[in-house]
Amino acid sequence: MTLSIFLAHQWHSFWRARNANKSLVLQIVLGIFYLLIFIDIAGLGILLPYLVQESIPDKEPISLFCSYIIYYFLLGLLVRFQLQELPSISIQPYLAQNIKRSSMLRFLNVRSLVHVINILPLFIFIPFSVVIILPVYGAFATGCFLLSMFALVINNHFLNMYIKRKSVSSSGWFFSIIVIILLLKGFDYFKIFSFEKTSANLFTGLLHHPGLCIIPVALAIFVFLLSNRYLRSHLYIEELVSERKLKVSRNYSFLDKYGDMGEMMALDLKLIFRNKRPKSLIILSGVFLLYGFLFYPRYLQTGNYTMLFLFALFITGLFISNYGQFLFAWQSSHFDGMMSYNINIKQYIKTKFYLFVTVSSLQFLIASFYGFMGWQIIPIQLAAFLYSIGINSFLTIYAATYNYKYLNLSKSASMNFQGVGAIQWLQMLIIAFGPVGVFFLLNKYAGFWAAIISISAVGIIGLALNKMIIHWLAGQFNIRKHKILEGFRER
C-alpha cells in the first residue's frame, strides 16, 4: 500500500463527505488567510533587525535574536499542542488487510508534516538569516544555522505528536511543559539564572562553529524515532478500545453530597474531559495563564494599567467566555432528551454559574503569583476576577440563549468556527472591551484606585444579585427554548 493510495482514499473521503462544499469553501478562505499571514511574517522577518536596532539600539541584533530562540520553541510547543491536530486515518478497515503497518505510519508522519505551523517559522528565520546573518558569517554558517532551525521545527513537531498521544492517558505531560516555561522565565525574571544569555551563547556559538548543527539534527531524528515507536506500539484496535473504556470509567463521587447540582456539575466535568473541543478549551485557559510573563512586565514598566486589566480579564475569565458561549450547545446532540425530563432550568443555569466561579477562582489563585512582579497586579487581577464572575458570567449565559447551532464535540476548538455566529463575536467584544473602556476612563480621570474599586463593586453587586439574575435568565431560556431545540436538530 503506497502513500499515493492512502492520499487517494483521503481525497475521495473529503469529496464524498456530507458537507464537502462547505468544507471546500472553508479551506479556500483559510488558504487566503494563511497566505496573508505568510506575507506579513516574511515582512516581519526582513524588518525585524531594523526594528530591533531602532527600539533597542544598544543591543546587537543577532545576539538578541538568538537569546529568545529557546523561549520561541518552548512556547511554540504549547501553541502546537493547542492548534495542531494529531494526523489520523480511519484505521480499522486497513488493520484487517494485508497492509504493512510501516506504510500506515509513513503516511501519518508525512501527512502530519504538511502543516502551516511547520512552514511559518521558515518565513521568520530565512529572511532574518539572509538579511543579517549572511553578510556577517557567510553562506556556510548561515546554511548550517538554518538547517539547525529547521531541525528544531521538526523536533517540536514530532515531540508535540508524542506528547499529545501520551496525554490521551495523562495530561501531566502538557502541564509539565507549562511548569518548565514558568520556571525558566521565573529564573530569568528574578536573575537566578539567565536562560536568555544561555540561548544567545548556544546559537551564536552555532554560528561560530557550524559543525555543531549535527546536534539539533540528531535530536530531531531521535524524537522522530521515539514518536514513531510509540505510535507503532499503539496501532491496535484493542489499544483504542481500552483507552475508550478508560475514559468512561472516570467518576466524580465527591460531588454527590451537593445533590442535583453536584450531579449536574459532574456531568459537565465528564463532558469536558471526554470530548476534544471542550477539553481543548481547558488547555487554552491554562496556556493563557502564561501570558502574564509576556505582557505584564512591559506594561508595568510603562504604567499602562488599562492593558494590564485587559490581560487580567483574559487570564482570570477566559474559560467563562470560551466555554460559556456554547453553554447549551455542548449538550446539543442530546438536548431533546434532556428537555423531555423534568429538569429544573434555574438549577441547571445555577450549576453552570458555579462551574464558572470554580474554574475562574482557580485561575485567579494561580495567577496571584504574578504579584511578585509588582503589587499593582494583585488589585487589578482581583477586580478583573470579580467582574468576570459577577457580570461576564451572566452576560455569557444570556448570549448562550441566542445560540441555536449544533456543536460537534469530537473536533478540536482550534481554527474551528462551528457554532460561532454574530452573537458570539458581539459577546466577545462586549466582554473584553466594555469593562476595559470603563477602566480606562476611570483610571484616567479619577485615578487607579477609583477604577479598581468601581469595577470590583460592580462585580460584587452582580454576585449579590445572582439569585434574581439566574431567575431572569431561566425565563429568557424558556422564551427561546423551542428555537434552541429546533436549531440543535439541524446537523
Image: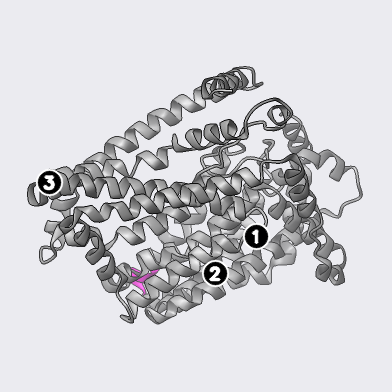
Query: How much space separates mark 3 and mark 2, taking CA atoms?
Result: 49 Å
Q: Secondary structure at mark 3?
A: helix
What residue range appears in magenta?
441-446
Circles 1 and 2, Cβ within 8 Å, touching? The answer is no
Does 13 sit above or below residue 56? above
Exactly how many numbered labels are in the figure?
3
Residue 3 or residue 189, whichever sits in front: 3
Residue 428 in sight: no
Where is mark 2, residue-wise?
Answer: 385
Q: CA distance from mark 1 to mark 3?
A: 44 Å
Q: Is residue 227 left or right of residue 184?
A: right
Q: Position of residue 95 (x, y in %)?
A: 70, 31
**Residue identified by numbered label 1:** 170
Of pointers 1 and 3, the one earlier in the residue sequence: 3
The residue under the point 66% across, 41% down is 235
Q: Amino acid at mark 3?
A: Leu
Instruction: Confirm whether the magenta stretch covers residue 405.
Output: no
Corner quadrant of residue 490: top right
In the rendered structure, the answer to whether residue 335 lies left or right of residue 304 reads right
Name which residue type carries label 1: Ser
Residue receiving disc 3 = 134
Q: Amino acid type of disc 2?
A: Phe
Q: Is residue 85 visible?
A: yes
Does label 3 or label 2 sit earlier along the sequence?
3
Camera-nearest label, 3 or 2: 3
Question: CA gap, disc 1 to disc 2?
Answer: 29 Å
Picture coordinates of residue 333 (x, y %)? 77, 38
Instruction: Name the residue at 55% across, 72% down.
Output: 364
